[in-house]
Image (cartoon, grey):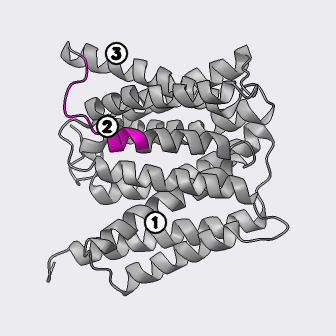
Amino acid sequence: MPEGRDGRPGLRAIALTVAAMLAFAANSLLCRMALQHGGIDAASFGSIRLVAGALTLMLVVRLRSGAGPTGRADWLAAAMLFAYVAFFSFAYLSLSAGTGALILFGAVQLTMLGAGLRAGEMFGPVAWSGFVLAVAGLVYLVSPGVTAPPALGATLMAVAGVAWGVYSLRGRGVADPLAATARNFVRAAPMALLLSALLAGTGSAHADAAGIALAVASGALTSGIGYVIWYAALPSLTAMRAATVQLSVPPIAAFGGVLFLSEAITPRLMLCSVAILGGIALVLMGKARAAKPQGS
C-alpha cells in the first residue's frame, strides 16, 4: 500500500522520497566537486550530464513501455532545461555547494510562487509574510559583504533557478512526466553540445577521467535515476508534502559540502537558510490553510 491507515506515506514512499532528495542534493555536490579542481570545464560538464541523463531516461522509458518517449514536443521546456543545466554548471565555478543549492531553490520557488500570484492565486497574511521573508533572505544572501557569495556565480545560479521554475511550470498537468522529462533531455542535449562546441574554439574545453565520471554520474544517476525515483514517490505524496519535503535539499547539499568538500557553513548562510526555507514553509502552510474548505 502506498499509504498507511492514517493517510501518511508508507515506508516505501518514505524511502523513495529520501532517496530522491539525496539525489537532487548530490547534483550540487557532484558539479562542485568536478569543477572546483578544474577536472572538467563547465560547458562539458553540462553537456555530458544532459547526454547521460537522456540516455538513461530513454532506456528506462523503453524498458517500461517497450517504446521510446513519444508525445508533443515542448521546445520551450527543453530550452529551459538546457538553460538550467548550463547556468547551474557555470555558477558552480565559484559557489559552494550549499550556497548554490540555496540560491537555486529560492529562485525556483519564488518563480513558481510569483507565477501563481500573477495567475490570480490568493495569498493570506501568513503566506504573504513567508513570501516577503523568503525574498528578504535571498536578497540578503547575495547582497555585498565580506561573506557574500561571488556576484557572478550568484547571478548565474539565480538565472538557473528561474529557468528551472519555468520548466517546472511547463510540466504541470503532463500525463506522463517521466516520458516528458526524457523527451526534454533528448532535445536539450544537442543545445548543450552546441554550446560546448562553440566554447571549444576558445581553448577552454578540457576534461579528465574523474571530471567525466562525475558528469556521467550527475546525468545518469542523480538526475536521470533521481527523477525516476521521485516520480515513483509522488503518487503517495500530497502536493503539500511533495513541496515541503523539497525544503530538505539545500541543507543536505550544505552538509554534504562540509563532509565531502571541506566547505564552511557561515553564519550568513545559516541565517539566510532559515529565512528562505522558513519563509517558503510559511507560504506552503498559508496556501494549505486557504485551500481547506470552511468549517473543516
Q: Nearer the viewer, mark 2 or mark 1?
A: 1
Image coordinates for residue 258, horizontal then vertical, percent: 75, 45
Give me the residue at 24% from left, 18% from top: 64
Q: What's the residue type where badge 2 is placed? A: Tyr
Q: Crowding near pointer 3: few (<14 within 10 Å), some, many (20+)?
A: some
Among numbered discs 2 and 1, the one appearing first in the sequence:
1
Q: Is residue 106 above or below residue 81?
A: below
Quadrant of the frame with the N terminus: top left
Would residue 11 appear left or right of 68 to someone viewing this image?
right
Residue range of the region highlighted in magenta in the rendering:
68-79
Quickly name the residue at label 1. 110
The reply to whether the C-beta atoms of the residues labelled 3 and 2 are less than 8 Å apart is no
**Drawn side of residue 151 relative to residue 230, left or right:** right
Mark 1 and mark 2 in contact (Cβ < 8 Å)?
Answer: no
- Farthest right residue? 146
* Residue at mark 3: 59
Between the C-alphas of marks 2 and 1, the distance is: 23 Å
The residue at the point 77 percent across, 71 percent down is 144
The one of 49 and 200 positioned closer to us in this rendering: 200
Say which residue label 2 marks: 231
Question: Label 1: few (<14), some or many (≥20) within 10 Å?
Answer: many
Count of number-bearing discs: 3
- Relative height, residue 248 to residue 26 (above, below): below
**Vertical arrangement, residue 9 with respect to residue 33, above or below:** below
Query: Which marked residue is nearer to the observer: mark 3 or mark 2?
Result: 3
